[in-house]
Image: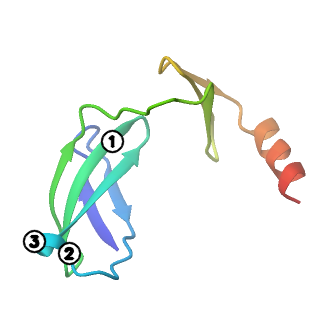
Amino acid sequence: MARFRCPVCGEEIYVNIKTVKEPIGGLYEAVVQHRDHFVKIYIDKSGFVRRAFPLEYFIRVDPPLYTVYIYEDRAEIIDRNGHTYITNPAPLIDAVRKITS
Ligand SMILES: [Zn+2]
């Protein structure tokens, strides 16, 4: 478990990285999506985050019409122009439960 402070919003983040291969140049590289922003991190072999910096551009080629993130306390619906709408997650959680059960 690696821990670092998000360079965008300052929140503490915990990530689990599966380390099966030897890291290139001694460090593992990872892109972390945190809320509505992306962070690039470098983790050493002992799981220590050596560097974390904001990714300025995250380009999704051929984006979906809508991307939906469902959290415990809210749901975020993001349209293809990047506008985020916050809504009540309960009906969406119900819908997913119906589909997956
Ligand atoms: Zn953040």
**Quadrant of the snapshot with the N terminus:** bottom left
Callout 2: CB less than 8 Å from ligand 1? no
The amino acid sitting under disc 3 is Gly
Q: Residue 66 at x, y = what percent?
A: 62, 27
Q: How would you rate the neighbour count of disc 1 (Cα within 10 Å): few for under 14, some for 14-19, many for 20 or more?
A: some
Residue at 42%, 34% in the rendered image: 36
Q: How would you rate the neighbour count of disc 3 (Cα within 10 Å): few for under 14, some for 14-19, many for 20 or more?
A: few
Side (left or right) of 32 relative to 51: right
Q: Nearer the viewer, residue 88 or 50?
A: 50
Q: CA distance from mark 1 to mark 2?
A: 21 Å
As displayed, is residue 49 above or below residue 23? above
Q: Residue 92 at x, y = what percent?
A: 77, 38
Q: Residue 97 at x, y = what percent?
A: 84, 52
As displayed, is residue 34 above or below residue 30? above
Which circle marks residue 38 in the picture? 1
* Residue at the disc numbered 3: 25
Q: Residue furthest front?
A: 62
